[in-house]
Amino acid sequence: MTDLALQHYLAVGAILFAIGLMGFVTRRNLIIMFLCTELMFQGIAVTLIAFGRYHFATRPEAFFASQAFVLFVLVIAAAEAALALGLIVLLFRRKQTLDAEAWHELNG
Amino acid sequence: MEHLFAIKHSYLIPLLPLLGAAIAGFLCTGKRKTLAHWPIWISVGISAILSITLLLGMLAEHEAPKAGLYHVQNWYHWISAGSFDASVGFLFDPLTAVMLCVVTGIGFLITVFAAGYMKGEEGYSRFFAYLGLFIFMMTMLVMGNNFLMLYLGWEGVGLCSYLLIGYYYERPAAREAAKKAFLVNRVGDFGFGLGVMLMFAAFGTVSYFGDGSGVLELATSGSLTGFQSQALQWLPFLLMLGAFGKSAQFPLYVWLPDAMEGPTPVSALIHAATMVTAGVYMIVRCGTLFVGNDAAMITITLIGAFTAIFAASIAMRQFDLKKVFAYSTISQLGFMFVGVGVLAPVAGVFHLVTHAFFKALLFLSCGVVMHAMLGELDMRKMSGLKHVLPKTRWLILCGSLALAGFPFVSGFFSKDEIVAAAWHRYPVIGVVLLITAFMTAYYTFRLYFRVFEGPLVLPTGVSAGHQPSPQPSPAGADSHAVHGADSHDAPAGHGTDHGHTAHHNHEPSLMIVPLIVLAIGALLAGYLNYPAERLGDFLGKSPSLVASFDIARQRAAAEGVTLAPAPFGQEEYRQLTKQERSAEDVVHLRMMVVSGLISAAAIYLAYVVHRQRRDVADLLYVRVRRIARVLDAKYWVDEIYQACIVESLRKLGRLLFVIDQVVVDGLVWLAGFTPQGAGFVVKVTSQRGYLQGYASAMVLGVLIILLIVVL
């Protein structure tokens, strides 16, 4: 049993991001789509932390920077979740559906 | 010489008229309109005084340096780009001084006249503003020390000419005439512009003089490169084209008769006395470029002589007073060109000066007639005007005698010098000029005897003025004159009533006094250069003439011909032996007698045919009606131009219009349509409002970018 190496973290991050992306592209429920964007965020955050830890010995400042960055991402994601969910509630009230297709007439 | 007040403050000579023009044009509006002549009078008057003091100051300079009496004054660098450098600088030499006196002096007299003539006009201040601008441009033209300033003035006077011909812009004929003048001049100016460019390409400068680095100095320096001497072969022809356009010589003369649509003071100032002589001035100024080039000199002589006789023959069958004098001006300009062409620049400039006096006088007298006859200018409709316009009759007689070259009047001496010089060089040209002189005297006195002598006939609606008329004249008839060749072209209401009565004075003193001054000039200006040749000696000190004479003398020596120095006004003339000199004078004297007799004979013929037996004229017309018809049609030159040039250009223009519409506009439309069309295609294919579609497109795009970056 080997220790967890960088590539494992990267693989988890990539998988999270890929699931999020696939979900975003294929699902039509607004809440699911929103959840998928959150998944992509987390995938990126995991990757960032992994890289930061990996470079800790040579460039400690990168480690701190990555941690700070990820904290920001989490905070922003939380704020965004509050906003987006509110918007989704409003959209639902308009059309009594969460289907993104319902809004396709907003096309440019 | 540079201590002269007029030279130290020479910037005032052009700038004051410009300032006057600005004041007249911008400030004299509304109620102040009737004051618009004051800024122009004052500014042009001061310019005239400065010019005269300049002339007198130069006359006082006795010993001239070998290279000629001149002073260059540079005010500031105008354009400086790479090796190109043009300064706003003035050249003061006798030629400039004489031209300045003519431009500002006669210009001043004409502005005085114009105040009387244009009184009550709608565009009174506009007229004076243009007049001031014209004087500014003309003084720049004659004072400039480089070809760029010459070109500036050249185009500037062309612009003023255009504006003033089209002064009555509400009249279609005036608009057409203005456009014609501008376009015909453009043909000549194109050549002139090319000439200036070639000059810069060859010599690297466009100044006349400047411590040995000016074009006119380099051209004689003797160390020319191959390109430079080749350029010298072509330069005179290019410059000549400009001169022919501006001075209305044969192929390009057609605009001048039409230019008579402008107000009469304009015809006198621009189209007789000053602007049209710019070509002669330019050729004399650039004598060093011309004199060495035989082909150019012969071309000038031939074109001048042909124009002289051609225009004079047309003038014999014109019935419009101003048209007669317009063709006469073209003919007299031909004389001047012959003068410079046969190596007698002094004679050319001398004729320019005398012509400025007598032709301005004749045109302004026409203006008085027109003013009194309510715009009527057809000599068939009037006769015996000496009873109505007694002063004008004497004035026009002075002018006519001078134009006809009647002995001992100014035109006689100046014309005679040209004829003698032509005779000396090419006897055939001399004969042509003598025939032209006969025609000139005939058509001048045909006009005089028809209009001023004989029984009193007035155009309808004109009262005799001084005699009490039995009935009040019809309303509107006593209104202010409708100035224009064709009064029926004028829109109704243009000649609005300015409160003149039927008995108003036909000869207001504001118009007569300047004419008296001009008449004195017309009678006596000939004594400027005869018998003592004072004008010639003075002009001979100009560096242009000194250098031209050197070239001409070298060429003459190489060909073994004797060259008369007198036409260049050079000192050598004084040092000729008595015998040589008297031989030359005898030729001149004989020529004087011959041309005097010719002039008298022509006047007598005109007297018989147009004063004593007017019925003979009609009989004569029937006899020679074929010739008369050709002359009446003015040799169909306008029609030929219309058919050959104007129509083909118009067709080309239509073709180009279609090309513009289809090809050029098509391309522009295509350029505008392509993004719009692309946008539409994208809108209907991918921009459909499905969130998943956008997301997949984005993913696809990121993938493509990644691929590009990684690979």
Image (cartoon, rainbow, N blue to C red):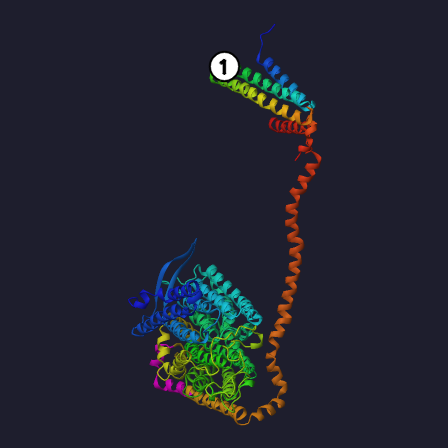
Q: At x 35% / y 65%, what residue is drawn? A: B12
Q: Position of residue B403 (x, y in %)?
A: 46, 83
Which chain does tag 1 point to? Answer: A
Spot occupied by residue B666 in the image (x, y as percentages of width and height): 66, 51
Between B11 and B26, the one nearer to me in the picture: B26
Seen from the viewer's position, the closer of residues B4 and B388 is B388
Q: Quadrant of the N terminus of chain B?
A: bottom left
Give residue B178's position: percent from left, percent from top: 54, 69
Amino acid type shown at disc 1: Phe
Which residue lies most toward the top here? A1
Measured along the vertical axis of the image, is residue B585 above or below residue A105? below
**Principal SS element in the magenta part?**
helix
Residue at the spot 66% in from the left edge and 20% down from the top edge: A32
SS at mark 1 in the image: loop
Res. B474 in view: yes
Indicate whether residue A36 is drawn in magenta.
no
**Depth check: A21 or B626 in front?**
A21
Which of the 4 image quarters holds residue B697? top right
Q: Which residue lies under the disc numbered 1?
A: A56
Q: Is residue B232 visible?
A: no
Question: Where is residue B235 drawn, in percent x and y?
Answer: 49, 66
Q: Is residue A31 left or right of residue B140?
A: right
Q: Residue drawn 48% across and 59% down?
A: B201
Location of residue B91 (image quadrant): bottom left
Q: How many marks?
A: 1
Give the crowd class for mark 1: few <14, some 14-19, many >=20 residues within 10 Å: some
Q: What segment is highlighted magenta in the picture?
A: B569-586
Viewer-closest of B224 and B210: B210
